[in-house]
C-alpha cells in the first residue's frame, strides 16, 4: 500500500474549512487505498484527516512522542500508533513509513516538518515527492518567501523543483498516483 505522510496542525484553525477539508482528504485517501502517516494526534487538523480516513475504511499510522501522549491527545483508534522518544525520531520514522509528503494548514511544527523534508531532498537523502497543498491560499506567503529566496540566490531553481504546489487535494492525489 502506498502511504502519504501528512504534515498539519494539531489546532483546528479559525476557519471550519481547515478541519472539513482535512477530513475530505482522509476520505479521498481511503477511497483510493492510500495509507495515511501522520503525527498521531486526535485533535485539530491532524485528528480530522485521520478520522476522515478511518471513517471510510482507510489505514492510518501515527507516530507520536511520549511527551505528547502524556498530554492525552494521542489518537486511540488507529491502524498503528508508534510512541517514540523525540520529535527527531518522530520525523525520521514518518519519513521511513511514507512514499510522499503533503503539507496542509498548520503552524511551526508543520513548517518544521515541511522544510526539513525538502531539505533532506535537497541534500539527496530521498527522492520522494513533496507537496504543498495551497488550498485557499494558505501557503501564499511561505511560497512567496521561497520565491524571494530563489531570486536572492539562496534557493536554486533545482531546489525550487523539490516540491510541488497544488491548490486542491484532488489534483495533488492525482499527481501522486500518476507517478
Image (cartoon, rainbow, N blue to C red):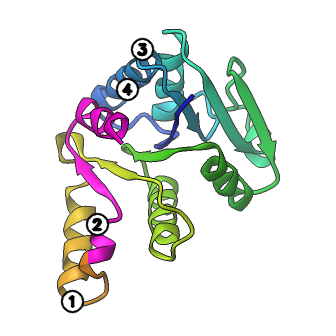
Closest to the observer, 75 or 93: 93
Mark closer to the chain start, 2 or 1: 1
- Density class for disc 4 (Cα within 10 Å; few <14, some 14-19, many ≥20) is many
**Cα–Cα gap, marks 3 and 1:** 43 Å
Q: Which residues are magenta?
A: 158-179
Mark closer to the chain start, 3 or 2: 3
Mark closer to the chain start, 3 or 4: 4
Q: Residue at x 28, y 54 (%)?
A: 164
Judged from the image, the secondary structure of the residue bearing numbered disc 3 is: helix
**Are the residues at dot 4 and dot 1 in contact (C-beta closer than 8 Å)?**
no
**Cα–Cα gap, marks 2 and 4:** 24 Å
Which label number is shown at residue 31?
3
Please, is residue 131 above or below residue 44 in the view?
below
- Density class for disc 3 (Cα within 10 Å; few <14, some 14-19, many ≥20) is few
Write down the residue under mark 4: 25
Write down the residue under mark 1: 152
Q: Quadrant of residue 14?
A: top left
Judged from the image, the secondary structure of the residue bearing numbered disc 2 is: loop
Amino acid at each position: 500500500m502506498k502511504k502519504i505522510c501528512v504534515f498539519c496542525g494539531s489546532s483546528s484553525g479559525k476557519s471550519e474549512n481547515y478541519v472539513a477539508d482535512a477530513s475530505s482528504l482522509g476520505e479521498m485517501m481511503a477511497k483510493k487505498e492510500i495509507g495515511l502517516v501522520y503525527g498521531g494526534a486526535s485533535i485539530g487538523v491532524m485528528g480530522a484527516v485521520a478520522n476522515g480516513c478511518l471513517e471510510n475504511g482507510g489505514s492510518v499510522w501515527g507516530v507520536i512522542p511520549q511527551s505528547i501522549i502524556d498530554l492525552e491527545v494521542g489518537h486511540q483508534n488507529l491502524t498503528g500508533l508508534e510512541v517514540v522518544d523525540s520529535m527527531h525520531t518522530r520525523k525520521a520514522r514518518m519519513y521511513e513509513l511514507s512514499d510522499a509528503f503533503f503539507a496542509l494548514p498548520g503552524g511551526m511544527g508543520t513548517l518544521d516538518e515541511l522544510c526539513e523534508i525538502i531539505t533532506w531532498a535537497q541534500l539527496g537523502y530521498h527522492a520522494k515527492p513533496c507537496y504543498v497543498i495551497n488550498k485557499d491560499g494558505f501557503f501564499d506567503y511561505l511560497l512567496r518567501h521561497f520565491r524571494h529566496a530563489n531570486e536572492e540566490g539562496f534557493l536554486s531553481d533545482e531546489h525550487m523543483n523539490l516540491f510541488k504546489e497544488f491548490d486542491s487535494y484532488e489534483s495533488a492525489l492525482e499527481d501522486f498516483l500518476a507517478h
